[in-house]
């Protein structure tokens, strides 16, 4: 049976999703952050295009006990949610940072041996 070639769009989406996770945790490691501030920074870095991308990620982090959420009731309107890393979230981030450093070093080593395309 012949294998289907990898779909480039799927590969790019998966890679961007994992980098978005790392960058979101990096932002949260600075302290408590309001959702719209995270969105703005991620949009400025061209890592996120729509709000709908961030909320499922924050839900996933919350479910895994990586983030703490604090609601601030404002009048009128819904409460504002502020996110921060838990101790478990900080440990998870440190592991991701170590893996990222290792991967970027490996990539630099491999690509340095090939002339520019």
Image (spheres, grey):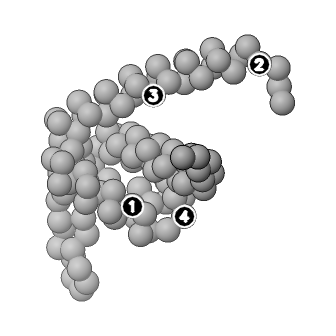
Q: Is residue 98 left or right of residue 77?
A: right
| Residue where numbered disc 4 is placed | 49
Q: Earlier in the sequence, mark 1 or mark 4?
A: 4
Place of residue 90 in the rendered image (x, y in percent of width and height, measured from the top left): 25, 34
Q: Earlier in the sequence, mark 1 or mark 3?
A: 1
Residue at 18% x, 41% y: name it: 86
Q: Do we see residue 102 in this rendering?
A: yes
Tag 2, which secondary structure?
Answer: loop
Place of residue 3 in the rendered image (x, y in percent of width and height, measured from the top left): 56, 46
Tag 1, which secondary structure?
Answer: helix
| Residue where numbered disc 3 is placed | 100
| Residue where numbered disc 2 is placed | 114
Calculate the distance from the C-alpha at mark 1 to the C-alpha at mark 4: 9 Å
Density class for disc 3 (Cα within 10 Å; few <14, some 14-19, many ≥20) is some
Tag 4, which secondary structure?
Answer: loop
Residue at 44% x, 68% y: name it: 51
Tag 3, which secondary structure?
Answer: helix
Q: Earlier in the sequence, mark 4 or mark 3?
A: 4
Q: Which mark is residue 54?
A: 1
Calculate the distance from the C-alpha at mark 1 to the C-alpha at mark 3: 21 Å
């Amino acid at each position: 049976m012949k294998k289907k070639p990898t779909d480039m769009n799927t590969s790019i989406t998966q890679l961007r999703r994992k980098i978005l996770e790392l960058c979101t945790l990096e932002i949260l490691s600075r302290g408590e952050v309001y959702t719209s501030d995270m969105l703005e920074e991620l949009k400025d870095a061209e890592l996120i295009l729509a709000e709908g991308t961030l909320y499922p990620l924050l839900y996933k982090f919350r479910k895994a006990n990586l983030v703490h959420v604090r609601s601030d009731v404002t009048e009128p309107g819904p409460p504002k949610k502020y996110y921060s890393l838990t101790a478990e979230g900080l440990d998870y981030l440190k592991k991701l940072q170590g893996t990222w450093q290792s991967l970027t070093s490996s990539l630099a080593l491999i690509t340095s041996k090939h002339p520019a395309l």
